[in-house]
Image (cartoon, rainbow, N blue to C red):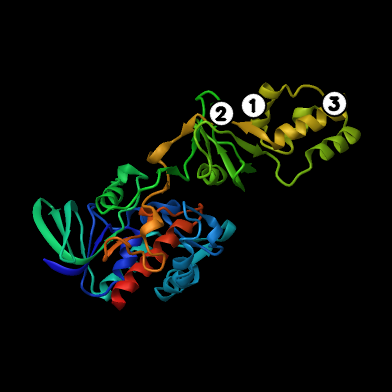
Amino acid sequence: MMVQTLILGAGAAGLMAAAQAGPDTLIIDHAKNPGEKIRISGGGRCNFTNMHCEPGSFLGENRHFHKSALARYTQWDFLDLVGRHGIAWHEKTLGQLFCDDKATQIVAMLRQEMEKAGAQLWLKTEVKGIAHADGRFRVALDREGRRETVSAANLIVATGGKSIPKMGATGLAYDIAAQFGHRVTETRPALVPLTFDKTRFSPISGVSLPVRVFNSQAGFEEALLFTHRGLSGPAILQISSYWREGEEIAVDLLPGQDLAAHLKAQRKAQGRRALTTELGNLMPSRLVGLLSDEMDLKGNLADLPDRRIEALSETLKTWHLKPTGSEGYRTAEVTLGGVSTEAISSKTMMSDRVPGLFFIGEAVDVTGWLGGYNFQWAWSSAVAAGRHIAAR
């Protein structure tokens, strides 16, 4: 079978590219259904983009590479597409946009756009080998037990990263990149919960509170959740992209509050009140209980000299913690790192080394913050590749 464009991967980036690349396009995926990551994202409502999608919210070896695609297909462009399909949406915190109903609406929208463009979709289809000669790619496939070979002038790799392997995630994109002479940067789980000794936070599993989590590279003021395994919640997922094993993180348990000034004022007004009681008015009591055991929070406010209050305030606003690890690709929302951008056009996503070869979405060394940024990168990079092909 001969096509103009073959797309590997029917996730967010692949489906979007199929809607842009022109009628002679085939998209394949080994899964039973397309867009599985879309379906499960955002608690089943899909955090499909972010109103504050800016270049500084992305990581990668080249901190400028993503700017071109994001500028030419913005969050407002995707929001316009959502509106044209009559999908109701709402904004949550920090510019995060979700479907009012189900994430499957986004999948259905992309399928409609793809079908309108004339693209075909083959599911339950696995890649068995790729060759390139005479300006065409020849891809050996196993389609539900039957062998097929597809010849294509363009090959778009949209197979994602390693995150959530139970959904079929593999390193196929990295293997293809290496086959065609592209370097792959170091990959590791990102937007992932951090783990600690099992006994550390088990007594307060389920407790959450707003905090600021930070290290030498970044800081995020969002919710933190204590779990049986360690720490989770948006603030932790965010900082995980900037954390490496063996490093510490710091937690400000009372962001925006001058704890020392507060305790001194309460010492004057309510000196007989227990320190733990006062702290319990500021944060969850179960957390105060754990901190009391770790930090010796005995006594009344009247018993605390200024130096003790100031030291305690510093401790609670820069609580240093050293994770033992992360939950890994099993629960990571994305993969940090990927196909190096050094030999990919930022305008078209095409390889500088192999004409007609494109890498898009999570497969590329571009990783966004939590909150819809990675979906926007999928849409933007897919449009850059698809429209370039359609215009050729």
Q: Quadrant of the C terminus?
A: bottom left
Task: Give left or right: position of 121 versus 376.
Answer: left
Relative vertical location of residue 77 with respect to residue 63 in this rendering, above or below: below
Q: Which residue is mark 2?
A: 201
Task: Give amino acid for label 2.
Answer: Phe
Q: Quadrant of residue 206?
A: top right
Q: Are marks 3 and 2 in contact (CB under 8 Å)?
A: no
The amino acid sitting under disc 1 is Leu
> How many numbered callouts?
3
**Which residue sits at x=36%, y=52%?**
339
Helix, strand or loop for disc 3: loop
The earlier-in-sequence mark between 1 and 2 is 2
Q: CA distance from mark 1 to mark 3?
A: 20 Å
Q: Is residue 352 left or right of residue 199?
A: left
Q: Residue at x 44, y 67 (%)?
A: 69
**Residues under numbered marks 1 and 2 in contact, where contact means CB atoms less than 8 Å apart:** yes
Q: Residue at x 35, y 60 (%)?
A: 360
Q: On the rendered structure, is 23 left or right of 215? A: left
Can you say whether 242 is above or below 135 in the image? above
**Amino acid at pointer 3:** Leu
> Could you tell which of marks 3 and 2 lies nearer the N-terminus?
2
Label 1 belongs to which residue? 290
Determine which of the numbered discs, if any, sits on residue 197 in the image.
none
Q: Position of residue 32 (x, y in %)?
A: 23, 53
Report which residue position mark 3 lands on.
304
